């Protein structure tokens, strides 16, 4: 395999890894609303390149050194991909549900403490927007602006539900919309019941995350041990791995490593929380 071919393959494979990582992280990006386009592919890739640029550079240097020692030019591709990709594949995937539940719990408890002072639902929402959790601060600011523009409370809450795009947020906002239509009657009891329900769901989600983490920890340990053993064996047992130095052997090696990475991708997808169906949709 010539240096030019190795360079071309390296560019293609590294680009593929970046695209795979961007695809895995798309779930953490809120979808576009009201016809606004989502961020372009470049907008999603640039933060990834900034975050992992140093690691990628170290991987390229290590790959070149490894290829020079072992005589396997394929290591110019394998090592950078492993240095950048393995920590991402073996890390815990983001769980937006837990983050959203924690924010909703804090917000609902704040509303429940504000309403008994004589404020209406909409007034309590305006007050709560000043000290809202980070996840809710932007949507709450828009909610207050819509209320100030004479939107009805149910319409504004439905629009906020679309921005949050969360089944858990839908349950809270639907209850608030009903309470606002009733003029706040029973709102305090409703909010306390919602807070208790959110706490129960949050506890269940944390238990689920603990169980999901167990196979991931085992796979992480096995992968680290495997990579370390193979690296040492390639450096000090080059005669045993001599067949992989041929073009056919390197193609076989790439195929085996690709299958292993595919299995890690499958495991990661299996441990990611499933998206739940929403109950609220905007009427606009």
Image: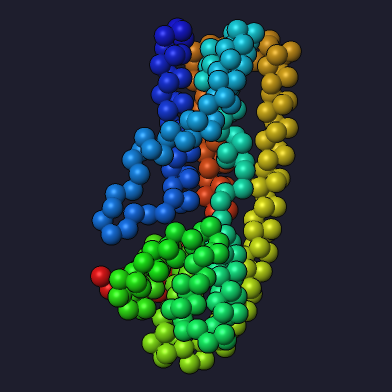
Camera-side residue: 264 or 239? Answer: 264
Q: Is residue 23 visible?
A: yes
- Percent position of residue 112, x then y: 58, 80
Q: Is residue 2 left or right of residue 222?
A: left
Q: How is the image coloured?
A: rainbow
Q: Position of residue 16 (x, y in %)?
A: 43, 31
Q: Residue 114 appears in which quarter of the rendering?
A: bottom right
Q: Position of residue 26 (x, y in %)?
A: 44, 47
* Image mark count: 0
Relative to 162, say whether 264 is above or below.
above
**Vertical placement of 240 versus 220: above or below?**
above
- In the image, 9 versus 259, the foreground residue is 9
Q: Position of residue 212 (x, y in %)?
A: 64, 56
Residue 162 lies in what quarter of the image?
bottom left
Residue lying at 55% horizontally and 77% vertically, measured from the top left: 111
Q: Nearer the viewer, residue 223 or 86?
A: 86
Q: Residue at x 35, y 73 (%)?
A: 147
Residue at 34%, 54% (x, y): give it.
32
Q: Is 11 left, or right, of 207 in this rendering?
A: left
Q: Quadrant of the C terminus?
A: bottom left
- Asked whether residue 171 is in view, the answer is no
Instruction: Please state if 225 lies on the left or on the right of 52 as rendered.
Output: right
Q: What residue lies at 38% left-to-right and 38% top-to-bottom?
A: 43
């Amino acid at each position: 395999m010539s240096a030019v071919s190795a360079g071309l393959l390296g560019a293609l494979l590294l680009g593929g890894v970046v695209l795979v990582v961007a695809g895995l992280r798309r779930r953490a990006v809120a979808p576009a609303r009201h016809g606004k386009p989502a961020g372009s592919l470049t907008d999603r890739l640039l933060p990834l390149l900034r975050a992992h640029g140093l690691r990628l550079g170290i991987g390229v240097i290590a790959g070149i050194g490894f290829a020079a020692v072992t005589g396997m030019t394929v290591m110019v591709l394998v090592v950078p991909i492993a240095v950048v990709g393995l920590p991402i594949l073996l890390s815990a995937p983001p769980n937006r549900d837990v983050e959203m539940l924690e924010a909703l719990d804090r917000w609902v408890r704040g509303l429940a403490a504000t309403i008994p002072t004589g404020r209406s639902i909409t007034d309590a929402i305006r007050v709560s927007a000043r000290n809202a959790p980070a996840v809710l601060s932007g949507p709450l600011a828009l909610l207050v602006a819509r209320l100030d523009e004479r939107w009805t409370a149910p319409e504004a809450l439905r629009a906020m539900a679309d921005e949050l795009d969360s089944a858990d947020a839908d349950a809270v906002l639907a209850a608030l919309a009903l309470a606002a239509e009733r003029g706040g009657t029973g709102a305090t009891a409703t909010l306390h019941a919602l807070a208790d329900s959110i706490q129960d769901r949050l506890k269940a989600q944390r238990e689920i995350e603990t169980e999901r983490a167990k196979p991931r920890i085992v796979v992480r340990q096995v992968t680290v041990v495997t990579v370390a053993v193979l690296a040492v064996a390639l450096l000090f047992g080059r005669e045993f791995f001599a067949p992989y130095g041929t073009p056919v052997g390197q193609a076989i090696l790439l195929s085996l490593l690709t299958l292993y990475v595919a299995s890690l991708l499958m495991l990661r997808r299996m441990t990611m929380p499933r998206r739940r169906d929403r109950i609220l949709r905007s009427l606009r």
